[in-house]
Image: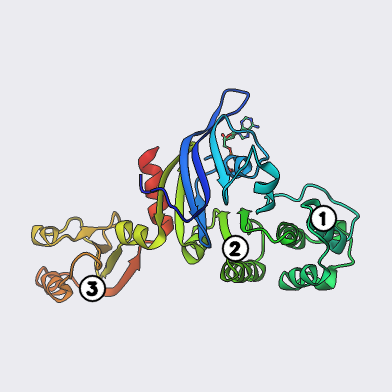
Amino acid sequence: MQNTPDSHAILRVRGLSKQYANGHHALHPLDLDIKRGEIFALLGPNGAGKTTLISIICGLVNRSSGTVTVDGADNVDQYKLARRKIGLVPQELSADSFETVWNTVRFSRGLFGKSPNPPLIEQILKDLSLWDKKDNPLITLSGGMKRRVLIAKALSHEPEILFLDEPTAGVDVALRQGMWSLVKKLRSQGVTIILTTHYIEEAEDMADRIGFINKGKLQLVETKQDLMRRLGGKTLSLSLAQPVDALPGQLVALGLQLSPDGLQLLYPFNDREQEHDFSALLAAIGQAGLGITDIQTRERSLEDIFVEFVGAQA
Ligand code: ATP
């Protein structure tokens, strides 16, 4: 598949599979290489296996077969070494602790055997707009603030790879933007980022490469640019002055389609592949006696591609 072995990979997954105790195959054997310093977005519908994959890589769930190597360290035989290189931001904050933000984050760093570094913790809390909350107990924080504490904890031991599992679910727009600017800053510092998200437009904005997982199978791994070039495209929509029942044959021959309500002419095209003579198209529409009141073009988004892709595999 498109996921060719990469000698610069910081993370190597080989033949990884998972069958849960109840017999459910959550992951079928899969290979994946993550390049050092990239932002990789793992997309897939609910129950696709995203969290299972991340949990196995981070050593939280046992694999059924396969290997995971984190920057050269096997995540089972050299668990501590591998785990130290990883920061994990889970979906939920597990404890509503009475501990303060500062102590929680400081303690997290200690868990990984790193010596105290108050200036680093201060910087992380400032980057996450949590500095003014540093003495507040976690239990008094809002949901969005708790999520930021999770990120601060994951960054406290200076990981080389950061996993973000649905980082912006239920987070307001301003905070979401702040989170993404932090992710970009971390990438510029050389941190490799792997995220799962249901907000496909976020993957479209942020990711260098996209992986689609569905029913436990990694169905596609491709750079975002290649994916958009290959499967992206545009549709020209022309609103008709009067609805029509059917299109004249000469317009169908030009590639025009009629919308189901008979109110629009649709012309799908891909300007990356070929040039189009829109003036000839408009002239032919005029000759057919159809009046046009509005013209729009719409680019297919990653979401359109994703929905079609998952639908086609269903
Ligand atoms: P979501 O987007 O909803 O978070 P996901 O892609 O992260 O979904 P997983 O949580 O990895 O999906 O779940 C994959 C499949 O494995 C699902 O069908 C889920 O019900 C099943 N599953 C997860 N954990 C267990 C478990 N402990 N025992 C049995 N089945 C499980």
Q: Quadrant of the N terminus?
A: top left
CB under 8 Å between discs 1 and 3: no
Where does residue 213 sit, x and y in percent of width and height?
47, 44
Circle 3: element type: strand
Q: Nearer the viewer, residue 114 or 100?
A: 114
Mark 1 vs mark 2, CA separation in Å? 20 Å
Instruction: Establish if 155 lies above or below 282.
Output: above
Q: Nearer the viewer, mark 1 or mark 3?
A: 1
Quarter of the image holding residue 62?
top right
Residue 292 badge: 3
Circle 2: element type: loop
Circle 1: element type: helix
Q: Is residue 164 toward the left or the right of residue 241 in the image?
A: right
User: What is the three-letter code of the residue carrying label 2?
Assistant: Val
Instruction: Identify the residue at image location x=44%, y=53%.
Output: 7
Residue linked to disc 2: 191
Q: Is residue 264 toward the left or the right of residue 162 in the image?
A: left
Instruction: Identify the residue at image location x=57%, y=23%.
Output: 23
The answer, for residue 87, to whether it is visible in the render is no
The answer, for residue 181, to whether it is visible in the render is yes
Mark 3 near ligand 1 (CB under 8 Å)?
Answer: no
Instruction: Identify the residue at image location x=57%, y=52%.
Output: 71
User: What is the three-letter code of the residue carrying label 3?
Assistant: Ile
Residue linked to disc 1: 110
Q: Is residue 143 toward the left or the right of residue 214 in the image?
A: right
Where does residue 39 sit, x and y in percent of width and height?
52, 61
